[in-house]
């Protein structure tokens, strides 16, 4: 069958983007996977091998942590950027940094499309796509979670896990821990599964950058931060 063209996928190695990679191949696309190192704990070499094993014709893994800090995190800290006085924009700041490289690679590969695994109801799809369009207005975005042929086939994570099992896709998500994680140098967040119910407390083991308040010291430490030219 004739290829629909080349698509550069923002790849994390997790359940969604691993299944999306295989699904894009099923749809007739040639897939190039791009994984940005923005400070997350990740076995990048294992992710490379996995993407190639799943059918990606090429895999790019780039360390963009320095530019993420200098061009995105520091300006946000200097501006005291907060959303609704609470959210430090840890995920939001990373998306334009990733999208910039995504577009660079699409142009380098002569790809007509970029793709992402963001849901069709959240903010990430907007962050990725507006960044991509701003940098390359003619780029086309494939957003599987907004395509009926995808989301009707995969109404939940159980169906994704069944698909992964059927196609031999190794994923770190199990029915016992059915949540996904977004981590970078600045923050970590979790979503999906039992965490979608606000009544559910965070299960043990979720805390990686902080301590569970119940297990934290009851005496404070004083930390002083000074800004130069900021």
Image (spheres, grey):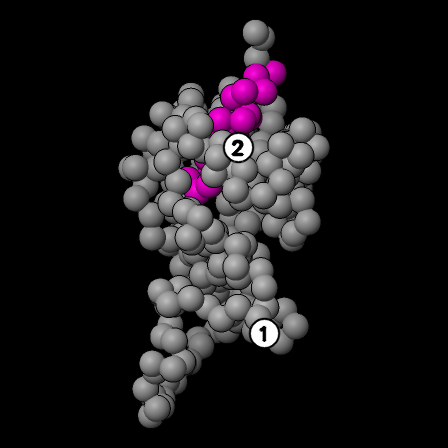
Q: Secondary structure at mark 1?
A: loop
Which-is-in-front pick, marks 2 and 1?
A: 2
Q: Do tag 2 and tag 1 residues touch (Cβ < 8 Å)? A: no
Q: Position of residue 138 (x, y in %)?
A: 68, 29
Does the magenta segment cover residue 54? no
Which residues make up the magenta segment? 4-28
- Residue 20: which disc? 2
Q: Give the camera-side residue of 216 and 81.
A: 216
Q: Which residue is mark 1?
A: 86
Q: Position of residue 210 (x, y in %)?
A: 38, 72
Q: Secondary structure at mark 2?
A: helix
Mark 2 vs mark 1: which is more N-terminal? 2
Q: Position of residue 105 (x, y in %)?
A: 49, 31
Horizontal side, residue 146 vs residue 191: left or right: right
Q: Give the camera-side residue of 101 and 183.
A: 183
| Outermost residue toward the top in this view | 1
The structure residue drawn at horizontal position 48% and vertical position 53%, both measured from the top left corner, is 179
Reply above or below: 121 against 104.
below
Q: Quadrant of residue 136?
A: top right
């Amino acid at each position: 069958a004739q290829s629909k063209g080349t698509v550069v996928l923002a790849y994390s190695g997790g359940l969604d983007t691993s299944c999306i990679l295989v699904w894009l191949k099923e749809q007739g696309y040639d897939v190039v996977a791009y994984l940005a190192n923005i400070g997350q704990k990740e076995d990048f070499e294992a992710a490379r091998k996995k993407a190639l094993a799943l059918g990606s014709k090429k895999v790019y893994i780039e360390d963009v942590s320095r530019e993420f800090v200098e061009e995105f995190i520091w300006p946000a800290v200097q501006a005291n950027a907060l959303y609704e006085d609470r959210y430090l924009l840890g995920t939001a700041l990373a998306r334009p940094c990733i999208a910039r490289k995504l577009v660079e690679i699409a142009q380098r590969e002569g790809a007509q499309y970029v793709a992402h695994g963001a849901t069709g109801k959240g903010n990430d799809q907007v962050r990725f796509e507006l960044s991509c369009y701003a940098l390359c207005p003619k780029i086309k975005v494939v957003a599987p979670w907004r395509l009926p042929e995808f989301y009707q086939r995969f109404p939940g994570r159980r169906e994704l896990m069944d698909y992964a099992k059927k196609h031999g896709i190794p994923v770190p998500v199990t029915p016992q821990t059915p949540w996904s994680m977004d981590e970078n140098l600045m923050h970590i967040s979790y979503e999906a599964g039992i965490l979608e119910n606000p009544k559910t407390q965070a299960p043990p083991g979720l805390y990686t950058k902080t301590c569970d308040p119940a297990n934290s010291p009851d005496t404070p430490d004083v930390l002083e931060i000074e800004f130069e030219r900021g």
